Image (spheres, rainbow, N blue to C red):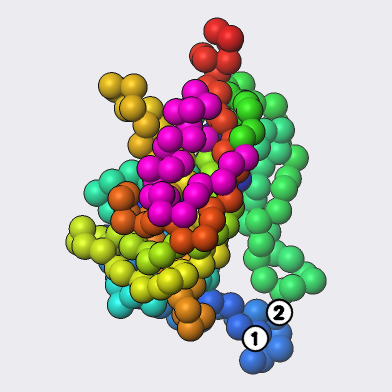
Amino acid sequence: MKNASTTILGGFFTELQYCVAPPDPSHKAVIAYTQPIRAGRAYMIFGNATLGKDAQGKPVVHCHAAIRTESGQTKGGHILTESSIVGPEPIPVLVTSLDGFELRVTYDPETNIELLEPKRSAPMNKTTIVEGGAMGRVAYARIAPNEDLIQGVEKLCLAEASRTPSSARLGSLVDACLGTLDGKCLQIKGPAVEIVSLAGEVRSNDDGSLSASLSGVVADTEGNVYGGPFVAGSNSICMTFEVTLEEWLPAVEQAAT
């Protein structure tokens, strides 16, 4: 796979660096990237990235994400992928392969900076597939007050006999509990702590049970925002939680149905 559009569903980094892009003070370009900002041992809450090639034909990843830094701040910006190291656990990523052209870093005269642009490419002789498949059913449901967020999503998937869906919607929690890199919990007191954004996946275990991995951004009663992975059994719904589940059918299962 040489060109792709990806959605990063959240995960820990042992080292993460990023920068932001304020207006260029010299006015020679639209923006001017800052010097690298060290987030340290951080958690990527959610991100999007594009895979392409630089001017020399080497792989390059353009990534923007919301993160929780080692100091606990919620920040966002342009991730410096060459200086960022994924933690001990793999990070789930939804990947869409882009065939028939290549994405190449090219000078853009309008903005006066280098950007990824699509270019015509020769026909591909070989295609690499990470996990082919298609979207299946879509389910919408409400999780009631005092039910746990993670366990509620897992129950919904079991009831619908659906596998590996991504989920996203909104609602509120009594208190929020977000996991940290050292295995502890960041507690955000309510009620009600509002869920601003949420994404993740639900995977089947070897014994047939399901495990949900959800991360997102929450806002406390004073409007402060926090981000990270939701800890199972520690995030009770306050008023309501509206959830949409999109089923993912791997190619093998799809062919069998």
* Amino acid on which the number 1 mark rests in the picture: Asp
Crowd tier of the residue under label 2, counting other residues whose Cα lies within 10 Å: few below 14, some 14–19, many 20 or above: some
Figure check: 153 above or below 183: above
Q: Is residue 34 magenta?
A: no
Q: Is residue 149 magenta?
A: yes
Q: Residue at x 43, y 71 (%)?
A: 191
Which residue is label 2 attached to? 30
C-alpha distance separating marks 1 and 2 = 6 Å
Report whether 247 appears left or right of 205. right
Q: Of helix, strand and loop, which one carries label 1?
A: loop
User: Which tag, 1 or 2, sits closer to the chain's start?
Assistant: 1
Residue 247, placed above or below residue 236? above
Residue for badge 1? 24
- Could you say which quadrant of the image residue 35 lies in? bottom left
Closer-to-camera residue (202/238): 238
Residue 158, x across and y down, in percent: 44, 28
Q: Which residues are magenta?
A: 140-165
**Residue positioned 51% across, 14% down in the render:** 252
Residue 150 as seen in the image, left or right of residue 168: left
Image point (47%, 70%), residue name: 192
Q: Amino acid at mark 2?
A: Val
Spot the residue most to the bottom. 25
